[in-house]
Amino acid sequence: MSVDKPKQPITMLADRLLVAIPNSEGERHSRAGILIPATAQVAKRLAWAEVVAVGPTVRSISAGDKVLFSPDDRYEVEVQGEDYLILRERDIHAVASERIINETGLYL
């Protein structure tokens, strides 16, 4: 007989971000429709992921934002049966967000 434990809330610490693993980590297609296998060597390709939770000292990123990061700067973790990545705010290269208004910078 299995009894499900109630899920505990997760709080990120310091400048850490919890992001969903991007779906694009496997096979991809080029614009011309050519299949690129997951094992193909790609020189320093950055990836996008959606932020699930942020630590208390994170200043410019909120849950729901999409962030651009290097796959080399990540830690994988399983939280309550789901796979996520943990990143530091300083390792984020860009943020795509609906709330960026009247700020300097590029819009992605």
Image: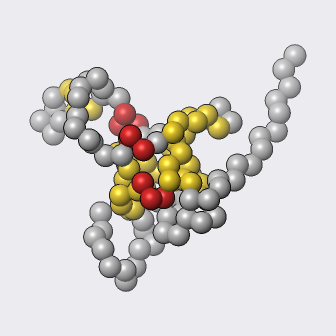
Residue at position x 59%, y 66% in the image: 57
Decide if residue 68 is on the left or right side of residue 15.
Answer: left
Residue at position x 86%, y 25% in the image: 3
Residue 76 image point, x, y percent: 53, 36
Q: Quadrant of residue 35?
A: top left
Is residue 107 something that shows in the picture?
yes
Residue 23 image point, x, y percent: 40, 37
Residue at position x 30%, y 74% in the image: 105
Report the quarter where the C terminus lies: bottom left
Residue 90 image point, x, y percent: 44, 59
Decide if residue 35 is on the left or right side of residue 93.
Answer: left
**In this rendering, is residue 71 above or below 63?**
above
Q: Nearer the viewer, residue 61 or 5?
A: 61
Is residue 67 something that shows in the picture?
no
Residue 106 image point, x, y percent: 28, 70
Q: Residue furthest top?
A: 1
Q: Nearer the viewer, residue 16 or 63?
A: 16
Q: Residue furthest left?
A: 32
Decide if residue 54 is on the left or right side of residue 97.
Answer: right
Q: Nearer the viewer, residue 8 or 16?
A: 16
Report the quarter where the N terminus lies: top right
**In this rendering, is residue 24 above or below 67?**
above
Residue at position x 39%, y 62% in the image: 95
**In this rendering, is residue 96 above or below 47?**
below
